[in-house]
Amino acid sequence: MGWSLRFGSVAGTAVRIHITFLLFLAWIFGVNYVAGGQMAAWNGLLFMVLLFACVLLHEFGHIFTARAFGVSTPDVILLPIGGVARLEHIPEQPSEEFLIAIAGPAVNVVIAALLVLIGGAHLNLDRLATLDISGGGLVDRLAAVNLFLAVFNLIPAFPMDGGRVLRALLATRLGYVHATEIAAMIGQWVAFALGFLGLFGNPLLIFIAIFVYLAASSEAHVVAIRAISRGVPVTAAMMTQFATLTPDEHIDTAVETLLRTSQGEFPVIAAASRPVGVLGRNGLIRALKERGPDARVAETMAGPLPTVGYRSCLDEAFRLLQEKRAPAVGVVDTSGKLVGLVTSETVGEMLMLHRAMPRGVKLGPWSRPAGA
């Protein structure tokens, strides 16, 4: 993720801190300094660091549970609004998604229990009922905030854990796609509610509401694409007319190619039309600015280009687009020659056309049931 710094790694998962998180800590220090002086500033900063250590443990609850089901976990990033663990894919088995989702809040409950049993923390139930976690000592506040995190994360809205728990429960009866649609709709209504509450004095809730709404929409979009691409030959949706570059070409040639086409991603091919990388519009502009027009494509391209065989299904190409965060996926024949290209734009167009089809109509490999 851009604007993030690698802090280290735990069990092979990189821990990243977004630059806005560091700014947030500086803001916390400044606010407490103005309100209560140097001691209050350091105490406020210590509490916030310990709080986000608990958030990090929450995310590793997800990570280690996901690994138990064979899901890779490349990194986790800390943001001002919490942590985000990146899983290469979300299991479609309801029981697996349920356990992965519930593991994070369970970690917070365990931390709170340990702080009470071992750390001697006292929980004021009246304050917890009113969401007031500001009173008491450091250990008391940490125990209270962990219980608050557990409850807050179980709100049924993507991307919070409660949204995934809800989908897992619904999927046991309704199927993965329909369950996602319902969970995403509920998540969007929750986002509206949070935004409305934020208008009455808490601007952070408005920011969270926007984040939740967009995440719920994105989750529904991704699942819909995955559903309609399952079992469809990749040849039915790939681009077959596209411009390519070679490693030895200069950036000025690539700029000319960019200007005379509507492509945003250019596969780089070597001998026998074998793909060796990809150069996107942003990378091209950056190379032109930093290296000049005489730089070679090989020096600036990203690689290798993920590929699938031309007999593969479209959902395999879409999976690579997601898991590798690749700008494009190449389609190759049995000799390794590049014969097609799948990008997020082509997949999005496919979904748009599918939604535009009248009910009960079949077009190519796609059909839209009468009740869909």
Image: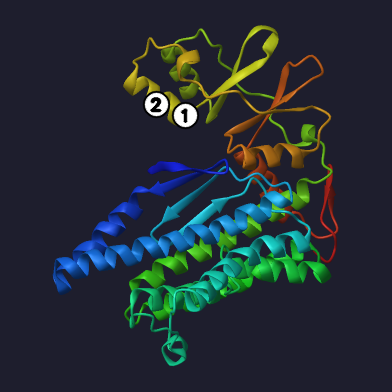
Is 15 in front, or is 229? 15
Query: Are discs 1 and 2 less than 8 Å apart at CB?
Result: yes
Q: Position of residue 209 (x, y in %)?
A: 46, 69
The residue pinned by badge 1 equals 281
Q: Is residue 171 left or right of residue 295?
A: right
Q: Is residue 178 above or below residue 242?
A: below
- Residue sitting nearer the eye, 115 or 288: 115
**Which residue corresponds to mark 2?**
285
Categorize mark 2 by other alpha carbons within 10 Å: few (<14), some (14-19), many (20+): some
Q: 294 or 57: which is nearer to us?
A: 57
Query: On the picture, is 300 further left or further right than 238?
Result: left
Cα distance between the residues tagged 1 and 2: 6 Å
| Point 29% across, 58% down: residue | 25
- Viewer-nearest residue: 366 or 69: 69
Instruction: Using the image, determine if residue 362 lies above or below residue 137.
Output: above
Where is residue 111 shown, x and y percent of the image? Answer: 52, 69
The quarter of the displayed image where residue 327 is located = top right
Q: Secondary structure at mark 1?
A: helix
Q: Toward which corner of the image does residue 5 lie, by quadrant?
A: top left
| Residue 179 x, y percent position in the rendering | 74, 67
For the question of whether residue 184 can be seen, the reply is: no
Three-letter amino acid code of the residue under disc 2: Ile
Q: Is residue 135 above or below residue 172?
A: below
| Residue depicted at x 52% and y 31% | 264
Residue 292 in the figure: left or right of residue 146: left
